[in-house]
Image: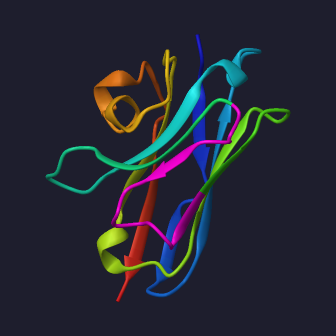
Amino acid sequence: QVQLVESGGGLVQAGGSLRLSCAASGRTFSSYAMAWFRQAPGKDHEFVAAISRSGGGIYYADSVKGRFTASRDNAKNTVYLQMNSLKPEDTAVYYCAAGGFSEFTVALTTRSNKYAYWGQGTQVTVSS
C-alpha cells in the first residue's frame, strides 16, 4: 500500500509559477507509475501528467504541455509538478496518484480509474 501527501499549492497570479510535491510512504515507490490529476469545482478529474516508474517516460495533457514539467526522485519517494506560466483556468485541486501498470501507455495512464492510490489534494488558485 502507498500513502501520498501533496504539498506546494497556493495562490499565485497569472503568469506565475508553483512547484507541487507528492511524498509517498513505503519502500515500493519505484514500482509505481505516478500521475497528476486536477479537479475544478463541478468538474470531473482531469489528467495533467503521468510519469513512468523510472521517470524516463512522461505524458502531458495538451492543455499543460510546454508549461508544466513532471519529475520524480525515487531516492526521496517524491514526485514533482513544476507549473510555469500559470493561467486562471489552471485553478483546481491537484491530486497525485500511484498506479501499478503492466505497461506505460497513454491509454492506461491518462485514465483516473486506473490509479489505485490517491493523495488528499492541494489547492492551486491562479488569479487574473
Q: Quadrant of the C terminus?
A: bottom left
Q: Position of residue 2 (x, y in %)?
A: 60, 18
Residue extending farthest to the top is 1
Q: Residue at x 38, y 80 (%)?
A: 87
Q: Residue at x 33, y 78 (%)?
A: 88
Left or right position of 48 against 112: right
Q: Position of residue 101 (x, y in %)?
A: 48, 19
Q: Is residue 17 above or below residue 92?
A: below
Q: Main secondary structure of the magenta part?
A: loop
Q: Quadrant of the N terminus?
A: top right
Q: Position of residue 126 (x, y in %)?
A: 40, 77
Q: Residue at x 71, y 24 (%)?
A: 30
Q: Which residues are magenta?
A: 54-69
**Magenta stretch: includes residue 53:** no
- Front residue of 57/46: it is 57
Q: Residue at x 49, y 73 (%)?
A: 11
Q: Position of residue 25 (x, y in %)?
A: 70, 22
Q: How many marks?
A: 0
- Front residue of 88/69: it is 69
Residue extending farthest to the right is 75
- Front residue of 103/112: it is 103
Left or right position of 98 against 79: left
Coloration of the structure image: rainbow
Left or right position of 70 against 54: left
Residue extending farthest to the left is 42
**Magenta stretch: includes residue 57:** yes
Q: Quadrant of residue 19?
A: bottom right
